[in-house]
Image: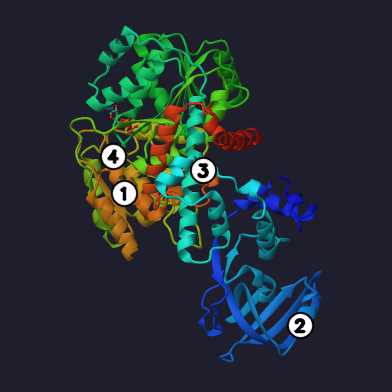
């Protein structure tokens, strides 16, 4: 329903609502308040220590100001509460307020409070007289310039009169079984609750629904996956496995079975391969790649950084050497001529395997017969990107690898459109990486420890947060650190530095020198965070460790402990706050990536860790994935049941449900087209 059908909403306000992502009456009615204010409980001016929205009963003492500043009419009153404390009330561009507010009278109002040099200033408060019809508890909505809280309250009130908008969406048996309140009651009470209990009921019902529809949509999306290639699992593939220098772990075999099952099937594979750092995901991917290529198809392997792409490229050349496979590298850093050459080869199918960065999926790259797409360290890419990728060719299988193990409940949400395979054991003979937390005071000691290891033939990484000098934060940065450490400690040792802003060729040379052992110590930003595999390096030293997330520290630590040598991770920080200590304790006491990521999720929230999701991909209005996981699991149960009974939502009783789901999918699809 058109927004303009609402009394009080014209073209101008409609445009502003659009900015808030509200395009229809249905959107508006589900535009939930971010908070509430009890307007019967008045704040004392003295009590205000934080900027927020409050309710007041104030006497207007005088008119302080009435003038135009840069085209904005500013009207300011001095007001006083019962305890004779003063504050300012200011209205912008509201000349009519002078007719409403009279000096000497007492008014009840609520509004946003700013603290300006300690003075309490209430901005554009809404006078209670106007909202009396609403009652004590008033919803607060996120606003945009040109629309007031009262506008939204009034419009929502209008919509609540329309029963068509309030029709039940959830199946009745679920409502009964879960003891949920009706959609109508829930919507009414999420906007205008009379007390806390009914609000909680409303929130529970609407959270349930929000996740319910999200999950069904994702599953339907997955179900609608196109027909794909039915690969044969070839004897040759097992010969390739036998040619490897190690035996696969049982866990690797298990996930490989799962992948092979998908590859054999005529449905598109959409699988997430996860496992702790160093568990050996890469080789599992390469075995799948081998099988796809020997079936006669092309494979694209996408890595998050150029350094990692190059490493995979070298590795592929080595293990595929005897198997007649053509491999190319396609990264941004190549010369235009080289790029064009590779692109032509891809088109002509002179290349079986192309390894690269996102350069792999630019418009110009046309695959002859792409059968499999692998993306490494997938947590950098999201649902949308994946959908885009699979649009590139007919219907390749997709295997994504993530190095941040996702706690089960969060995986349920984040990757509900993927099947998940988990490698849960490390190859034999791995030693625990001893991890220490120290302050910079001990620099001489830990650097000497590094030097001893270097004299015994080992290598080390030193990681710090920034590239350039920053005067705001006193953090170590790559260049300074390099110069200082070189001068103070490593005069006679080959050390170098690397960071993301260097040109690709420089980076490549340095990585090669580190791999070959020419460079003994590599000082770096987090460009080496994921994937890098230099077996001889056995020490990871991290400056300003407090600046990194736990999963990130665990990833960095995973760069060592890859060979037979005893390995160490030294976390340096001068910060000793409780939270830093707590986090470092987790690192020094555990090497279990699943445990660490669980803690990380609890401490930081999932959005930070899976950064890309913040960019608006999966945004819930009411659900908090950490807190609501019981609810999520419950919802999942119902969704699985329902889709088992009616996989394509064809039954009459699920008609309304289907409509809702298709609206959601259409929205997602539109967003993809728009991007
Ligand atoms: P990740 O899962 O972090 O991507 P990698 O795939 O880089 O881990 O593997 C880490 C190291 O373990 C590599 O040097 C790899 O060759 C080695 N590796 C993988 N699988 C096995 C195995 N089954 N036995 C011994 N070493 C293995
Ligand atoms: Mg890896």
- C-alpha distance separating marks 3 and 4: 34 Å
Of residues 557 and 235, the one drawn nearer to the viewer in this rendering: 235
Residue 574 against residue 548 in the figure, above or below: below
In this rendering, the label closer to the viewer, 3 or 1: 3
Label 1 neighbourhood size at 10 Å, few (<14), some (14-19), many (20+)?
many
Image quadrant in which you'd find residue 282 = top left
Name the residue rendered at 51%, 62% in the picture.
471
The residue carrying mark 3 is 618
Pair 2/1: label in front = 2
Q: Earlier in the sequence, mark 1 or mark 4?
A: 1
Q: Position of residue 504 (x, y in %)?
A: 51, 34
Q: Which residue is denoted by mark 1 in the rendering?
A: 541
SS for dot 1: strand
> Which sits earlier in the primary sequence, circle 3 or circle 4?
4
The residue labelled by disc 4 is 560
Q: How many marks?
A: 4
| Contact between labelled residues 2 and 4, with CB atoms less than 8 Å apart | no
Name above or below for residue 111 compared with residue 547.
below
Q: Which residue bears the numbered disc 2?
A: 65
Number of residues whose C-alpha sits closer than 10 Å to that of mark 2, classed few (under 14), some (14–19) or many (20 or more): few
Q: Earlier in the sequence, mark 3 or mark 2?
A: 2
Quadrant where the C terminus is found in the figure: top right
Query: Element at badge 2?
Result: strand
């Amino acid at each position: 329903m058109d927004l303009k059908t609402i009394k009080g909403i014209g073209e101008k306000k409609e445009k502003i609502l659009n900015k808030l992502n509200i395009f229809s009456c249905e959107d508006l009615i589900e535009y939930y308040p971010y908070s509430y204010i009890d307007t019967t409980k008045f704040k004392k001016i003295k009590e205000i220590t934080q900027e927020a929205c409050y309710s007041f009963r104030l006497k207007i003492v005088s008119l302080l100001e009435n003038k135009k500043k840069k085209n904005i009419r500013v009207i300011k009153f001095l007001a006083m509460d019962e305890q004779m404390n003063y504050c300012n009330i200011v209205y912008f561009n509201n000349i009519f307020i002078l007719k409403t507010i009279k000096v000497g009278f007492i008014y009840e109002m609520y509004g946003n409070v700013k603290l300006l040099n300690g003075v309490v200033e209430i901005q554009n408060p809404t006078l209670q007289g106007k909202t009396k019809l609403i009652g004590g508890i008033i919803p607060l909505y996120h606003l945009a310039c040109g629309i007031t809280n009262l506008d939204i309250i009034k419009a929502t009130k209008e919509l609540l009169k329309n029963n068509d908008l309030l029709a039940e969406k959830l199946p009745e048996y679920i409502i009964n079984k879960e003891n949920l309140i009706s959609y109508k009651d829930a919507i009414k009470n999420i906007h205008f609750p009379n007390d806390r209990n009914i609000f909680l009921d409303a929130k529970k019902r609407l959270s349930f629904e929000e996740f319910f529809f999200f999950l069904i949509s994702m599953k339907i999306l997955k179900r609608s996956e196109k027909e794909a290639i039915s690969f044969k699992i070839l004897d040759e593939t097992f010969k390739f496995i036998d040619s490897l220098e190690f035996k696969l772990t049982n866990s690797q075999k298990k996930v490989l079975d799962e992948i092979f099952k998908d590859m054999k099937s005529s449905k598109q594979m959409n699988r997430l391969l996860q496992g702790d750092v160093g568990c050996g995901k890469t080789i599992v991917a390469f075995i799948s790649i081998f099988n796809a290529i020997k079936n006669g198809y092309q494979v694209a392997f996408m890595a998050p950084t150029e350094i990692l792409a190059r490493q995979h490229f070298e590795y592929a050349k080595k293990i595929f050497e005897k198997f007649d496979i053509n491999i190319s590298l396609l990264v941004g850093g190549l010369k235009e001529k080289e790029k064009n050459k590779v692109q032509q080869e891809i088109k002509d199918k002179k290349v079986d395997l192309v390894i690269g960065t996102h350069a792999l999926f630019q418009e110009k790259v046309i695959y002859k017969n792409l059968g499999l797409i692998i993306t490494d360290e997938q947590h950098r890419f999201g649902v949308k990107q994946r959908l885009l990728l699979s649009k590139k060719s007919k219907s390749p299988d997709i295997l994504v690898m993530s190095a941040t193990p996702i706690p089960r409940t969060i995986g349920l949400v984040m990757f509900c459109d993927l099947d998940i395979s988990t490698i849960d054991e490390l190859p034999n003979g791995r030693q625990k990486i001893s991890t220490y937390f120290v302050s910079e005071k001990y620099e001489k000691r830990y650097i000497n420890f590094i030097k001893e290891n270097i004299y015994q033939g080992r290598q080390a990484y030193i990681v710090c947060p920034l590239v350039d000098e920053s005067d705001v934060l006193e953090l170590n940065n790559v260049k300074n650190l390099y110069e200082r450490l070189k001068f103070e400690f490593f005069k006679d040792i080959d050390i170098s530095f690397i960071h993301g802003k260097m040109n690709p060729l420089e980076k490549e040379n340095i990585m090669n020198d580190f791999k070959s052992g020419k460079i003994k110590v590599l000082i770096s930003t987090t460009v080496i965070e994921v994937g890098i595999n230099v077996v001889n390096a056995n020490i990871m030293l991290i400056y300003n460790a407090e600046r990194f997330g736990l999963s990130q520290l665990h990833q960095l630590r995973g760069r060592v402990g890859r060979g037979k040598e005893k390995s160490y991770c030294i976390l340096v920080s001068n910060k000793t706050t409780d939270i830093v200590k707590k986090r470092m304790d987790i690192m020094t006491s555990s090497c279990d990536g699943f445990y660490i990521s669980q803690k990380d999720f609890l401490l930081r929230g999932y959005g930070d860790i899976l950064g890309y999701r913040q960019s608006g991909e999966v945004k819930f209005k009411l659900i908090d994935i950490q807190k609501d996981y019981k609810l999520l699991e419950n919802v999942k149960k119902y969704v699985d049941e329902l889709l088992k009974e009616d996989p394509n939502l064809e039954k009459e009783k699920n008609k309304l449900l289907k409509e809702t789901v298709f609206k959601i999918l259409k929205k997602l699809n539109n967003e993809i087209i728009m991007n």
